[in-house]
Image: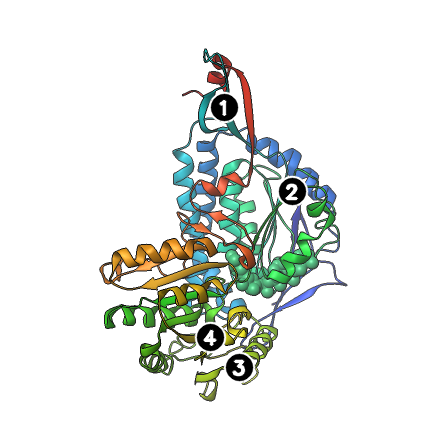
Amino acid sequence: MTIDLQNYTESTWRPASSTARQRLLDPVLGTDLAYAGADSVDMAGCYRWARQQGGGALRGLSYPQRAELLDSIRQVLQTNRDRYLDISLQNSGTVERDSSIDVDGALYTLSYYATLGRSLPDAHHLADGERVSLSRDGSFGTQHILVPSHGVALLINAFNFPSWGLWEKAAPALLSGVPIVVKPATATAWLTYEMVRDVIQAGVLPDGALSLVCGRPAGLLDALEPLDLLSFTGSADTAAELRGHPRIQHDGVRFNAETDSINSAILAPDGSNQAEDLLVREVERELTSKSGQKCTAIRRIMVPADRFDAVAQALEARFSKVTVGDPRNPDVRMGSLVSRSQRRAVEAGIDALSASCETLFDGRTRTLVQAPDDSACVPPVLFGARDPDNCPAVHRTEVFGPVATLMPYRDAAHAFSLARRGMGSLVASVYGEDLAGLARAAEQLAESHGRVHLISPEIAKTQTGHGNAMPQSNHGGPGRAGGGQELGGLRALNFYHRQAAVQGYADALEHIAPA
Ligand code: NAP
């Protein structure tokens, strides 16, 4: 049965239009799963309802009360977890372990923000820093405060995280008291739709707090107003297009972008064989998890020049054991890409890199497990760039699949300069035993990376992984990575609040933000 992904606006379910609807397909079997379209949606009406009904109701609650809403959402989703994993298998082509990153990652993030919200003041705004005196006698001063935005937050998501991508944005927005309109990527909108539907049916949120549009309705950006917010995740090209929209360029709609990233993994100059093994395992995990379709996935691997061949062999040995195919088959470790068009895009990227790189491993010569030849499955491919200074493609081509390039470096400074050629990335990881050396690496890499992941053998079993965006840590990166910032604990709330400096009599300021 093919499912009609309805839109939910102004607290009403609205079917996809019958004329301009898009099909969602099983990427392995090619069968129809659902269709989506939002032609009939009035975006101005949707946003107005969300601002007035949803925003008003959410702002009437304190932070701990909103934290309880997040926990209620988590409970609804937890009850339906197995159904979500099944949808993910069909629509994203992922094995259970990979679907769990999306589904359980969302549950964990909601639970984290619920806990964080319970610890916030029982209030409707937050103090930002300490009160500062502006007069000699201390009678006149200034206090910065954070108040929830009265606008609506439009959340536009990428196809690779229909669950986590939704809730990692929704949790800080709702905790801040801001209503949300969710626009999932069409290719995988089914899971988002089911989750939103379950939460709406459970009646745990006030009217207007959560709306959903599946597809590309007219007026999606045009109908935003100057005090609204837009949080986007997707490609750098789409971010550039949205950034140029008049509502953002001229009207001041606040815009956050999480985009492409050419992330690095670096073996420290004096890293032991154990550190090398940790790097190799992580690269394998990053390339195979969700078939490399993670914005944080390792794309470039930098090793001391005299370790290049050993690392290449270790990676080839690991990749040759990865079984790729239909995720329904229990022998399969890595499922498919999200769609056949993504397969074409990844293959075009592989062709582009192969023009300037050596192919060290190409899993595409192997047989897929129980998947038709025209499925969206693409096995791992490892390239080598022995002269990375003169191979610009490896520093700027994001192949959004199981593809990475190994490159040698001369010394630490050379490794850092290569990492920086990504022109702003989400994450770099460094593997070694010299703890002071790892700390120096962090100082060098932090300027061009949103997160630096330092791995020494002591934390081999406890570390959370290069590619996992933990809600406690910043997610985002400068430059090419979009210049945005999400998560990072309470930092995520800043985007959904307005900051104002209040000046006045010290005793009045005491009422605004009690010490
Ligand atoms: P995409 O093509 O840029 O699409 C992202 C979202 O934008 C989708 O919901 C898409 O809707 C929507 N969109 C596209 N053009 C639009 C327009 N003109 N107006 C309004 N909405 C528009 O990216 P994708 O292919 O889904 O995702 C893959 C990319 O996302 C990769 O480059 C990856 O690196 C990046 N990504 C980054 C992060 C991060 O946190 N930094 C996380 C995940 C993915 P439709 O689906 O309807 O076209």
Dot 2 and dot 3 residues touching (CB under 8 Å): no
Q: Residue at x 54, y 50 (%)?
A: 484
Q: Earlier in the sequence, mark 1 or mark 2?
A: 2
For the residue labelled by badge 1, is the local secondary structure a helix, a strand or a loop?
strand
Q: Earlier in the sequence, mark 1 or mark 4?
A: 1
Q: CA distance from mark 2 to mark 4?
A: 54 Å
Residue type marked 2: Ser
Q: Which residue is mark 3?
A: 356
Q: Residues within 10 Å of mark 4 (few under 14, many from 20)?
A: some
Q: CA distance from mark 1 to mark 4?
A: 51 Å
Determine if the C-beta at disc 3 is less than 8 A from ligand 1. Answer: no
Mark carried by residue 11:
2
Q: Residues within 10 Å of mark 2 (few under 14, many from 20)?
A: many
Q: Nearer the viewer, residue 390 or 218?
A: 390
Give how far across and how far down residue 286 sits, in percent: 41, 68
Residue type marked 1: Gln
Q: Residue at x 52, y 61 (%)?
A: 423
Q: Which residue is mark 1?
A: 143
Residue type marked 4: Pro
For the residue labelled by badge 2, is the local secondary structure a helix, a strand or a loop?
loop
Quadrant that contains the C terminus: top left
Dot 3 and dot 1 residues touching (CB under 8 Å): no
Dot 1 and dot 4 residues touching (CB under 8 Å): no
Q: CA distance from mark 3 to mark 1?
A: 56 Å
